[in-house]
Amino acid sequence: MKVGAIIPAAGRGKRIGASVAKQFLEIQGEPLLHHTLKVFASSKLIDYVVLVMPKSDLNEMGDDWLNKYEIVRGVVAGGEQRQDSVYNGFNSLEKATDIVVIHDGVRPFTTPKMIDTVVEEAKQHGSAITAIPVSDTIKQVSDGFVKQTVPREGLWRVQTPQAFQYGLLKQAFKKAKEDSYYGTDEGGLIEYLGERVKIVLGSERNIKITQKEDLALAKNIFLSIK
């Protein structure tokens, strides 16, 4: 079984308000993206990684990322939206890849166990995504006022890593492209295709660093796991 991972790190991270893209912000002396790649290099099931970067950064530092990490075998430019970036990565996967793992470059707190579990579940079920059950009360809001309380039973917050059989994900991308459909994650593309998606329990620690507060939390998490 050959497993390739796509790590989209092509966003500019405007919400975090930094002068550089958030995936290149340093924690403990290394870029966030370094910490994410380090986890993937520790997985027993990941054979290689395709890294997706902003085109401007690709021209400036793409070779550095390719040469520094043995597990990174391809660096490609991102697209207009996240789905476009992942698709660019998908088109750069090595031949005979059986399982495709997709993981946000700014989620440095996934674990090798989490990665390996979604791979094994995707091998069995076709697709698998990490998620955690919703514990907060959820309100539907209209014009600034609560419209109703949404029952939280059965609601899950989706994370990455997500894993898919290569052929299934290829079909999902093809249909999405034909219909000009954009999902918020690749699991959503599988749903749009009409196929089932297996849930794997993620972790509250597996945060996506989007806001300044997330960056501060990430620094504390790194200190706590030292």
Image (cartoon, rainbow, N blue to C red):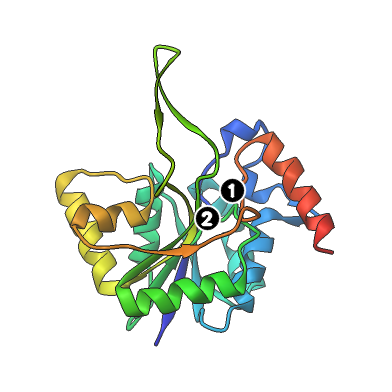
Amino acid type at mark 2: Asp
Horizontal side, residue 139 vs residue 69: left or right: left
Marks 2/1 in contact by CB < 8 Å: the verdict is: yes
Horizontal side, residue 100 vs residue 30: left or right: left
Q: Is residue 173 above or below residue 180?
A: below
Between label 2 and label 1, give the one nearer the viewer.
1
Taking the spot 66% from the left edge, 31% from the top edge, the residue there is: 17
For the N terminus, give its image quadrant. Answer: bottom left
For the C terminus, give its image quadrant. Answer: bottom right
Q: How many marks?
A: 2
Horizontal side, residue 174 vs residue 104: left or right: left
> In the image, residue 45 lies at what x, y percent?
51, 82
Q: What crowding class fits label 1: few (fewer than 14 Cα within 10 Å), some (14-19), or many (20 or more)? A: some
- Which residue does the numbered mark 2 point to in the structure image? 104
> In the image, residue 88 lies at what x, y percent?
36, 58
> In the image, residue 110 lies at what x, y percent?
61, 63
- SS of the residue at dot 1? loop
Q: Who is closer to the viewer here, 217 or 39?
A: 217
Q: Who is closer to the viewer here, 132 or 218?
A: 132
Q: Who is closer to the viewer here, 66 or 95?
A: 95
Q: Is residue 219 above or below residue 140?
A: below
Amino acid type at mark 1: Lys
